[in-house]
Amino acid sequence: MASAASVAITMAGMRARVLAATIAALALAACRATPPPAPDDAAVAETHALGRFTEAELAASFAAHASILEGFDAPDAAGGAWRFGDRALYGIRLDDDSGEWANERARVWLVLAEVVSDTAPYGHPIVVDGGEEGLRAVLAPKMSALTFTLPSGEKIERSSDSIVLAVTVFDETGAEIGRSLVAAPATFLGEGFHGTCSRARTWGLPLQENDSEAAHALITVITSFVGFLETFHQSPSLESLRTTIAASTLAKPSIFSAIFGLRLSIDPMITSPIDESRPLPARRDGDGALKFTTTLTLNGTPALALDLVVVEPAPPLRVVGGVIGFEASHPSLPQRKFAARLLAARRGPPKKTAAAPESD
């Protein structure tokens, strides 16, 4: 594998308490294909040793999803406007074999995200009218504009239109746990990761610091990742889920460094973007699914290496930025692990156009 190279890019304008103000060291390396594991006990044991689940385990855990949402609509290659009712369903499983949880080794959640508003330009509030369900709110998007500084000194500002998602959480039986509204960055989710990951396979290595094309493309990865994280970070209905997963899988910084506060940094390292060969539920023939890794650090200590599986974010997959799976495990305790799979995604109905008045 070729040695990794990096282009340093700094970023400002985000809420510091959520994400660090600097995202740097975006590295790319050579691509390679990975054959599927053999379906035998040895392969399963190896999968577990790496802090991963088998697809059969996950499918069994998420069986109740059929009562919430089933099937995948064909991606709308032309894109088109966001629609009320665009929706996607994730299944998430967390395991902890460390012995710290009494009689609670595995946890399963099902998470549905559904569009419930029109898009609104950056900086404008959004009015949501839930009709009979009574979900009515005026949301002010919390995502601020992002400013990037390239090694050349060039500054690039990015902002996003907003869309409101209703995020509903269910337990492993399909029973609803909670529901909330979140203003999501529509532009960032619509750009997704897949385009840049695909282009990265054609770039020469090492990258040069004055490679403006690569730098601009990598900024898209950052904004897409920020959009994906912020969508789920802002949702109150996911607070318990987030806290539980973080407590189990994040490596904690030293007590001494924590005295001075916690600093979260994210390095979206497109480290060896590889062809995804596993039969994830959302896979389609010819979808060109790719997997890459992003690393989270707390106070300079690697806390989590997160693998994402991505495809083009064509509707209805745009709701989740084209992320059809993600997974991670504790850096030193692989028995603490979680995984998510996109289980269903449906397009909302086209907006009705007003009928033209009849002529006399």
Image (tube, rainbow, N blue to C red):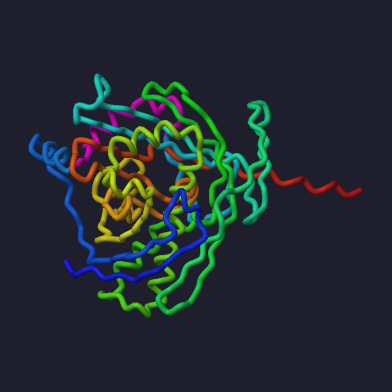
Magenta segment's dominant SS is helix
Q: Is residue 107 left or right of residue 187?
A: left
Residue 204 visible in the displayed image: yes
User: Does the segment drawn in magenta span residue 179?
Assistant: no
- Based on the displayed image, in which of its 4 quarters is residue 138 positioned? top right
Q: How many marks?
A: 0
Report the front residue among 96 and 100.
Answer: 100
Q: Quadrant of the N terminus?
A: bottom left
Q: Is residue 154 left or right of residue 355?
A: left
* Looking at the image, residue 209 lies above or below residue 341: below
Which residue is at 17% across, 43% downward?
50
Report the front residue among 172 and 202.
Answer: 172
Residue 360: image location, x then y, percent: 92, 48
Which residue is at 35% across, 53% downward?
287
Residue 316: image location, x then y, percent: 49, 46
Q: Residue furthest right?
A: 360
Q: Is residue 332 left or right of residue 243?
A: left
Residue 286: image location, x then y, percent: 33, 54
Which residue is at 41% across, 77% downward?
212
Residue 121: image location, x then y, percent: 64, 55
Q: Which residues are magenta?
A: 51-70
Q: Residue furthest left?
A: 42
Report the front residue among 129 and 125.
Answer: 125
Which residue is at 38% across, 40% downward?
342
Residue 296 visible in the displayed image: no
